[in-house]
Each structure stands twice: as structure tokens, then as C-alpha cells.
Image (cartoon, rainbow, N blue to C red):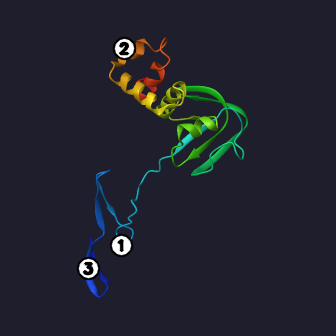
Amino acid sequence: MTKKFKSYGKVVKYDLNYYCNKCKRKHRITSKIGKEHKIQNKQKIIYKYYAFNRPLYIGTYPNNNIIKINNYPVKENINVDFLNCKVFGYIIYNKKLSFKQIYNFELIPSNKKEYGMYMIWSKENKNIKNMKKIISMYKKMDINEIKKWKDRDPYAYYILLILNKN
């Protein structure tokens, strides 16, 4: 669909639809200018973190990009497929927290991959370079070999979480 707009005395033809390479569909541009378009049907990515050490009150969580905070009246047991523990509540963000923020505020990521990376990071004395070396070393190995070492190797379980091969 094309429309004509008057722009500084000139008539400009303008296409109101565009093709999105990410989702392979056509979208309608909602702004007249077209530079700042909004994609309809865009999914919102959220990041959920559990508070296992204390309830979520002022000063016990990072304050930026919060969507929702939920404190349980008593410590509740959560049964996520990779995590089984008692928590005080959860907090939802629209941006991912850094490993240092997760560590400082004593939170647990609810995402398998993020949890595995965080645990390796914390075991490697909070060093991102060492964490990346370990992950790349394990990625070169066969999955069945990693599964054999799951009980004896402290990193094997977390690597399986990262690779989603649990």
C-alpha cells in the first residue's frame, strides 16, 4: 500500500508496508516518517530472577528496568526443571542483569543457560575470560562424553544446561 504525503511542498510516495528479515513477514509502519517504526506482534523478552536468601525489599535488588516484583508470604519451594529450592519471591526485568549484579544481590536466574553460565562464572573467581574458555573447551567435546562426567566434573552439569542437552 502506498500513500502520498506532502513534505516541504513536494509530494512523496511512501510505502506503508515493509518486510522484516527477523520474522520473515510484512509489517505495517505505524509512524508517518518510517524511520522509527514499531513492529506489531513483537514478543517481549523478560528475565526472571529468584531471591533465595532474603525477601525483595528496597536495596535488595537492582532498581533499573523492573517489570514486576513478587514476594511470597513464606518461603516457597520452586520446581524448575534444573532447580529445586526454596525462595522468598521473584523479580522480572526487561533487560538481562550482569553476573556481578546477580552475585551482589544474591539472586538466581530462572533461565537454564544463564544459570549455567552464572554458576561457572562464580566458580571461576568471577572471571568472564576463564568462563568463556571453559565453555568453548566443553563445546568441542562430544555430548555423551560430557554426560558421563556429569557426576564427577563440577562444570559438566552446568555445561549441559548451557547446551540445553540435559
**Marks 2 and 3, how far apart in space?**
63 Å
- Find residue 12 and name its label: 3
Picture quadrant of residue 103: top right
Residue 75: horizontal and vertical position, in percent?
A: 71, 32
Circle 2 SS class:
helix
Q: Is residue 69 left or right of residue 116?
A: right
The numbered mark at residue 33 is 1
Q: Which residue is mark 2?
A: 145
Q: Amino acid at mark 3?
A: Val
Which badge, 2 or 1, comes first in the chain's sequence?
Answer: 1
| Percent position of residue 47, x then y | 53, 43
Residue 164 appears in the figure: no
Label 2 amino acid? Glu
Label 1, label 3: how far apart the Cα atoms are: 11 Å
Residue nearest the observer in this picture, 67 or 54: 54
Looking at the rendered structure, the kind of residue marked 1 is Ile
Q: Residues within 10 Å of mark 3 (few under 14, many from 20)?
A: few
